[in-house]
Image (spheres, rainbow, N blue to C red):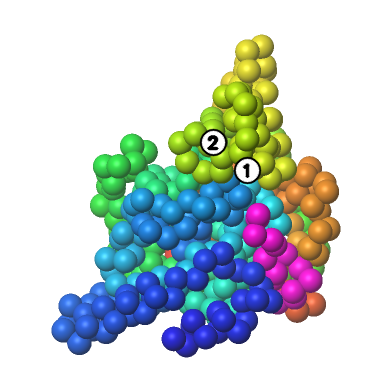
Amino acid sequence: LHFLKRIETLDPQLNSLITVTAERALAQADAADARLASGDATELTGIPLIQKDIFCTLGVRTSCASKMLDKFIAPYDATIVEKLDAAGMVMLGKANMDEFAMGSSNETSWYGPVKNPWDTQRVPGGSSGGSVAAVAAGLAPIATATDTGGSIRQPAALTNLTGIKPTYGRVSRYGMIAFASSLDQAGVVARSAEDCAGVLQAMSGFDVRDSTSVDRPVDDYVSALGRDIKGLRIGLPKEYFAEGLAPSSRERIDQAIETFKKLGATFTEISLPNSPLSVPTYYVVAPAEASSNLARFDGVRFGHRAEGVKSLEELYKRSRGEGFGSEVQRRIMIGTYVLSHGYYDAYYLQAQKVRRLIYEDFRRAFESVDLVLGPTATDVAFKLGEKSDDPVSMYLNDIYTIAANLAGIPAMSLGCGFVDGLPVGLQLMGNFFDEGRLLNAAHQYQ
Ligand code: GLN
């Protein structure tokens, strides 16, 4: 009730939620009380959370922030929804986001932009802008999020939260509306690494319904939090501290490095030579996969259907033209182009080869270091509208986050200070399935 009241009074200013599920929440809270009384509870029983509106929720609108799915009531629960419900968590509502998770500012949502609680003239980052704004404003202690090219980490950085994107395949994608299937991963945002650890543990694990989910036991992230980090070897990629990073953000990150040194970590400079190629590579691979995944929204099976059409072709054209916003249409066009005959070899195949080189960079780096540290974003939160007419400058915003998705490795962001009252984030990247080490390093720092 405390959180539902806060949502009612504060969310009109933030627009962080698309749907509030008060009745469902109250029923879950009663069930949680009963479980707690009977001693059959988990650590998460009764803890409220917000689900990003990309996850299917049985009987509840699942819009992906698109007009296309504005009236779509999911007929089943995503695996992570099932798992967190089973742990006894209480879902308060569904978070706003960029349309189909395409964006870095949460301005592409059909339901309007989300405001950053630290300064409501500014963006909260994206695409998980609703998830972070809700948690940063205290509308919920935890929110789920997804990260295809930074959509957990960049918004967490812009709102002083901790967010983790696990290894590709660690968390099931079943019931998570697909954007770029080879990059999409679900994760969590919260106020601390400790809060993230318990929820991530409950979300993770093999799922027969997702063919890319990995059949490997989930580590105990919560008990990994107790270890000291003496001797932890951290690499600083020189490409991440080059031109493009705001000097004031850099100062905060340098201070955090000093703190990690005091905790016993050692630092070495490393090189990820192909990292300048990650933005162009991502903006070929992700739109290519998106154009294929979004072909299912044809006005016939589900989603928005145009009225008064005279032919099947007109039905497709108008339903998609009316249902998708301009950023989604731009991605579909880029993706269709790079996959088309005659361009496939020049763009898509080339991008796949560079993707391999980016992965090799990390593989080499993790032969000599345990973690990689760098900035999450180039600067603090920018103003609403500042970049919305300039897609290229918006895409360049993802420069530090995208490589982890292309390589498939886990990565997280945590707050490391403020510049003029606006949060700065620090990024930690780890080797495959090293989520426990990442969370513990963040926890020791916090
Ligand atoms: N900003 C990136 C994009 O627009 C990342 C999105 C994401 O991670 N979902 O594609």
Is 288 left or right of 369, judged from the image as shown? Answer: right
Judged from the image, the secondary structure of the residue bearing numbered disc 2 is loop
The amino acid marked with disc number 1 is Gly
Quadrant where the N terminus is found in the figure: bottom left
Q: Residue at x 65, y 54 (%)?
A: 110
**What is the quadrant of residue 357 in the picture?**
top right
- The percent position of residue 441, horizontal first and vertical second, equals 48, 67
State the extent of the magenta-drawn residues as a range. 109-123
> Would you say residue 12 is visible in this rendering?
yes
The circle on residue 299 is 2
Using the numbered discs, state the Cα–Cα distance from disc 1 to disc 2 in whole angstroms. 9 Å
**Which residue carries the number 1 mark?**
323
Three-letter code for the amino acid on which mark 2 is drawn: Gly
Q: Residue at left 34%, top 41%?
A: 210
Residue 61 vertical position relative to residue 193 in the rendered view, above or below: above
Q: Secondary structure at mark 1?
A: helix
Q: Which mark is residue 47?
A: none
Taking depth in this image into account, of 74 and 82 the one nearest to the observer is: 74
Q: Is residue 122 magenta?
A: yes
For residue 205, above or below residue 264: above
Identify the residue at horizontal 56%, vertical 40% (top origin): 305
Q: Quadrant of residue 295?
A: top right
Q: Are marks 1 and 2 in contact (CB under 8 Å)?
A: yes
Closer to us: 327 or 75: 75
